[in-house]
Image: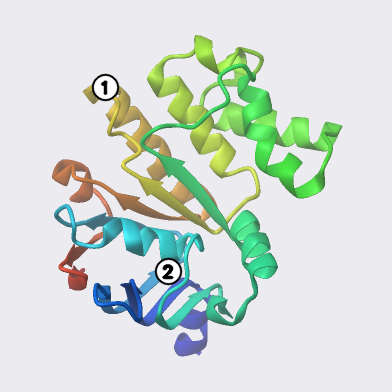
């Protein structure tokens, strides 16, 4: 029973993931060398490593923005390496949320409209249900009173809160946060980190946080360290 429960709680499993660029050319280079990794439901995990270690390449694979050269990448039990591009796009839109260092909000849009974007892309036209979800998410990140403000009129910390709400719009089981506090001051960093931890604990959403901030990394459930395309620490 325990083994069945453990598999059911897996959000992400990477098995023997390798990634090469320039395949078949004299400059062919393997960046990732057989990555094995499992993330469980509700985990809050830091991914660290020096520049050039392969973090961005790994994140692109997990986010289904690129394909591995070999190995298996499963999200909630679905082997993504067998999917075509349309299936990958749909799975990414529904099962993975993204928060970046730069928030990538549409500055002329309101906070509400920005949070609605993933739902609009999925369903094609706005409706009352989308607006309700978006307002609820903005309230969840402490911005209920800023829903109708243009993103351009918000502080950096507020914009990143909108970005987190947008990442949650499709209720994904996995959120990839790539240096989400890199452009923020200390106070805003602490607030954003606490918010993400609260969301993970309350909703069971799994977070993979890429960071150079070792102080934040050591506050996560565990640390995965990547060096020269290999996992050297995963606990």
Q: Callout 1: 10 Å neighbours few (<14), some, many (20+)? A: few
Locate residue 116 relative to residue 125 in the image: left or right.
Answer: left
* Drawn side of residue 33 relative to residue 57, left or right: left
Question: Label 1 belongs to which residue?
Answer: 187
**Closer to the camera in the image, 19 or 28:** 28
Q: Is residue 221 visible from the viewing direction of this image? A: no
Going by the image, does 115 lie left or right of 34? right
Q: Which mark is residue 40?
A: 2
Q: Which residue sits at x=19%, y=61%?
A: 53
**Residue 55 higher or lower than 185, as above or below:** below
> Residue 140: x, y in percent?
56, 32
State whether residue 82 is above or below residue 51.
below
Residue 146 falls in image quadrant: top right
Residue 25: image location, x then y, percent:
31, 77
First along the sequence among labels 1 and 2: 2
Quadrant of the image occupied by residue 109? top right
Please tell me which residue is depicted at 80% across the width and 47% down the height of the picture. 123
Q: Residues within 10 Å of mark 2 (few under 14, many from 20)?
A: many
Measured as percent of width and height from the top left, residue 154 is found at: 48, 13
What's the CA distance linking mark 1 and mark 2? 29 Å
In the picture, the disc for residue 69 is none
Is residue 193 visible in the rendered image? The answer is yes
Label 1 sits on a secondary structure element that is helix
CB under 8 Å between discs 1 and 2:
no
Per the image, label 2 sits on a secondary structure element best described as strand
């Amino acid at each position: 029973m325990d083994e069945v429960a453990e598999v059911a709680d897996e959000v992400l499993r990477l098995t023997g993931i390798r990634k090469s660029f320039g395949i078949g050319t004299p400059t062919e280079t393997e960046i990732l060398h057989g990555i094995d990794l499992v993330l469980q439901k509700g985990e809050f995990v830091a991914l660290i490593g020096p520049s050039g270690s392969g973090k961005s390449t790994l994140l692109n694979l997990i986010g289904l923005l690129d394909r591995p050269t070999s190995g298996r990448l499963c999200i909630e039990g679905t082997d993504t390496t067998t999917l075509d591009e349309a299936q990958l796009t749909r799975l990414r839109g529904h099962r993975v949320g993204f928060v970046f260092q730069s928030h990538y909000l549409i500055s002329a849009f309101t906070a509400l409209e920005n949070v609605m974007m993933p739902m609009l892309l999925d369903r094609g036209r706005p409706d009352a249900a989308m607006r309700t979800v978006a307002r609820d998410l903005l309230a969840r990140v402490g911005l209920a009173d800023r829903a109708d403000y243009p993103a351009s009129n918000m502080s950096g910390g507020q914009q990143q809160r909108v970005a987190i709400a947008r990442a949650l719009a499709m209720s994904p089981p996995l959120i990839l946060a790539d240096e989400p506090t890199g452009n923020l001051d200390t106070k805003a960093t602490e607030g954003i980190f606490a918010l993400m931890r609260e969301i993970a604990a309350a909703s069971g959403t799994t977070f993979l946080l890429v960071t150079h901030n070792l102080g934040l990394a050591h506050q996560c459930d565990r640390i995965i360290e990547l060096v020269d395309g290999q996992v050297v620490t995963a606990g």
